[in-house]
Image: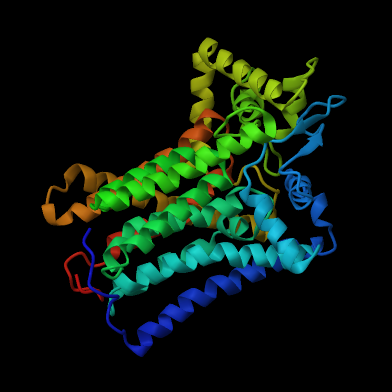
């Protein structure tokens, strides 16, 4: 993918107005989403937040790292003090929001929402630079960029301050956008800047969710394909490697063990691989898998977080090896949740018109995702034109990211929010297909 000498020439006033519209509509929808979903929590103390976000934020602000002690992992009567159970991004963003705006749920939620929207805004700008100046494709690209904001599963990620996907969704999207578009619209001489920006996005992705480690590897491979300068390749590899190495050092200092993951990885694996899994997966609408933690811990005592992790990891692996048929049946259910189901799993239950809107949004996502997947496969298998190398590379990047994002949840268990991080990358790949490949777009290729 070659560089161009400068950003594309000044577009028409109408085209610039479209950019402002594309940038402002997501902000408006997202802030409305924060109010709709969180206004009832306006007076809720942030330190009381569930999913371990409140306690880890409180510990971080007190200078004690990400430490919290709890029985909520299904160990009643056996509180475990966790030092290595959470990746840092969630607590860091919420802590920064509290520093700036105090213990005010709505203000911090708005802060997080706007901060994590910035990478999405950059995605939109990069696509806009390649968008045709006229024609039906221009309109369709604009629709694709806005379509995720009509999908409630995506808006939930944008506005949610409690789940890892609320932070990883935009970092994954901007890393993908930089690979699909950034190398063809960036000015000559900005190679170092775009490389550092890409590495920062990938590092942030990893630090938001340990399950994104495979996606980090896939994105790094994509960078090595699109960047031909050895110096920048080595720089990005070193910068990206710094995050897991630095996290492993922190984990050793905080908990006594080097780990690129967390001490909850074991129970997350066990929750998706145990004798009772097929009886309660996928969970009923509005339910989750957390209620079954106590069943996996019954009659057991754990002295610390790593003995807790190691027991569940071993139990899960033993089950995988001894029950291949049940494991396959469970994997098929996970595949359905990740790639086919229209119903939402692992979140609050909805009814009436809201449920219809949720299902329609998921249907839009499935159509967009499978269009992108099938087109990517076709381009890899059937396209041999050397002039379309950039499209084949884009296809490889997209498919590898999809696979890398899915594998951890096929190994463990999958909710709708686990796959929702692919909503914007799917839209971006569809936009990439629609952007002119023959030099007549609004860039000087």
Q: Residue at x 76, y 44 (%)?
A: 64
Q: Is residue 365 visible?
A: no
Q: Is residue 192 visible?
A: yes
193 versus 397 height, above or below: below
Residue 105 picture quarter: bottom right
Front residue of 247/85: it is: 247
Q: Is residue 78 left or right of residue 395?
A: right
Q: Residue at x 43, y 59 (%)?
A: 197
152 versus 339 height, above or below: below
Q: Residue at x 17, y 70 (%)?
A: 439
Quadrant location, the C terminus: bottom left
Residue 35 in percent (x, y) is at: 72, 68
Front residue of 282/77: it is: 77
For the view shown, which residue lies furthest in the bottom direction? Answer: 13
Q: Is residue 189 left or right of residue 56?
A: left
Residue 17 picture quarter: bottom left
Quadrant location, the N terminus: bottom left
Residue 236 in percent (x, y) is at: 37, 49
């Amino acid at each position: 993918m070659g560089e161009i000498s400068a950003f594309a020439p000044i577009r028409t006033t109408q085209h610039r107005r479209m950019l402002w519209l594309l940038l402002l509509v997501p902000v408006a929808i997202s802030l409305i989403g924060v109010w709709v979903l969180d206004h009832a929590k306006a007076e809720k103390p942030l330190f009381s937040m569930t999913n371990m976000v409140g306690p880890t934020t409180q510990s971080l602000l007190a200078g004690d790292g990400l430490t919290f002690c709890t029985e909520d992992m299904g160990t009643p009567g056996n509180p475990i003090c966790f030092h290595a159970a959470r990746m840092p991004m969630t607590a860091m963003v919420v802590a920064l929001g509290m520093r700036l705006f105090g213990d005010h749920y709505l203000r911090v939620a708005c802060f997080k929402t706007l901060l994590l929207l910035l990478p999405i805004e950059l995605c939109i700008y990069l696509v806009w630079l390649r968008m045709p100046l006229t024609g039906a494709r221009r309109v369709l690209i604009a629709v694709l960029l806005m379509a995720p904001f009509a999908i409630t599963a995506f808006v939930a990620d944008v506005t949610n301050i409690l789940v890892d996907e609320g932070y990883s969704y935009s970092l994954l999207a901007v890393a993908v956008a930089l690979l699909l578009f950034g190398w063809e619209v960036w000015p000559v001489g900005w190679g170092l800047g775009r490389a550092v920006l890409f590495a920062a996005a990938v590092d942030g992705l990893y630090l938001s969710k340990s399950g994104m480690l495979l996606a980090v590897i896939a994105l790094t491979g994509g960078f090595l394909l699109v960047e031909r300068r050895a110096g920048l390749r080595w720089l990005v590899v070193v910068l990206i490697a710094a995050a897991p190495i630095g996290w492993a050092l922190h984990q050793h200092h905080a908990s006594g063990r080097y780990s690129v993951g967390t001490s909850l990885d074991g129970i997350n694996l066990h929750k998706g691989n145990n004798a009772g899994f097929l009886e309660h997966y996928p969970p009923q609408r509005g339910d989750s898998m957390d209620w079954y933690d106590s069943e996996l811990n019954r009659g057991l005592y754990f002295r610390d977080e790593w003995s807790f992790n190691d027991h569940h990891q071993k139990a899960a692996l033993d089950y995988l090896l001894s029950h291949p048929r049940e494991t396959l049946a469970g994997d098929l259910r996970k595949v359905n949740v990740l790639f086919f189901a229209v119903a939402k799993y692992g979140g609050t239950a909805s009814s009436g018109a809201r449920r219809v809107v949720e299902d329609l949004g998921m249907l839009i996502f499935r159509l967009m995702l499978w269009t992108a997947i099938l087109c990517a496969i076709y381009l890899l298998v059937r396209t041999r034109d050397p002039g379309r190398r950039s499209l084949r590379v884009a296809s490889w990047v997209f498919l590898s990211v999809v696979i890398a994002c899915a594998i951890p949840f096929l190994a463990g268990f999958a909710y709708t929010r686990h796959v929702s991080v692919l909503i914007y990358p799917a839209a971006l790949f569809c936009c990439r297909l629609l952007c002119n490949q023959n030099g007549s777009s609004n860039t000087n290729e």
